[in-house]
Amino acid sequence: MSLEKFLKDFLIFQIKQKLDKIKQEIKRFDNPPPDLVILSYGIVIGYMDIVTEKEISSERINRWKELIYAKNKLIIIIPKEEKLKIMEILWKEGIAEKVSIGTYEVNISLP
């Protein structure tokens, strides 16, 4: 299993734990991107895409545009250190104000 796949699976697990507390569920999308569909009582309320550093591509951005222009809510989860770079790309594409951004960071503290 690649490190990126492991990281995505871990993040999906953590997101699922948080959304279960507010009575929302997530399902993996059959054909990513996006990675997840957010449901509330069986109704689709949005999509979530978890992005690692190497996954930003024009194909992915075009898929985000399709979702946004179809009036869907899109949440993008990105590495904290890549936020500025990805926000610049979103502004250039004209979709930054229509996307919700979440970040993740892996911290390991050793004595």
Image (cartoon, rainbow, N blue to C red):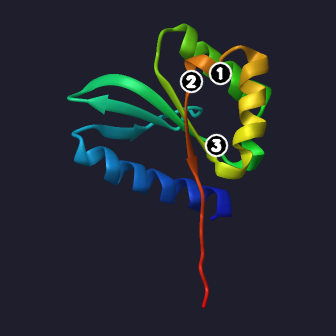
Q: Which residue is mark 3?
A: 51
**Which SS class for mark 2?**
loop
The residue under the point 20% across, 29% down is 41
Marks 3/2 in contact by CB < 8 Å: the verdict is: no
Q: For residue 99, which numbered disc appears in the image? A: 2
Q: Is residue 10 visible?
A: yes
Residue 74's place in the image compared with 1, above or below, is: above
The residue under the point 46% across, 28% down is 47
Quarter of the image with the C terminus is bottom right
How far apart in space, not on screen, are marks 3 and 2 (Cα)? 14 Å
How far apart in space, not on screen, are marks 2 and 1 (Cα)? 6 Å
Return the disc, 3 or 2, that comes first in the chain's sequence: 3
The residue under the point 26% across, 29% down is 40
Residue 49's place in the image compared with 18, above or below, is: above
Percent coordinates x, y for residue 91 in the rendering = 74, 21
Task: Give, as a three-letter code, the residue at label 1.
Answer: Ala
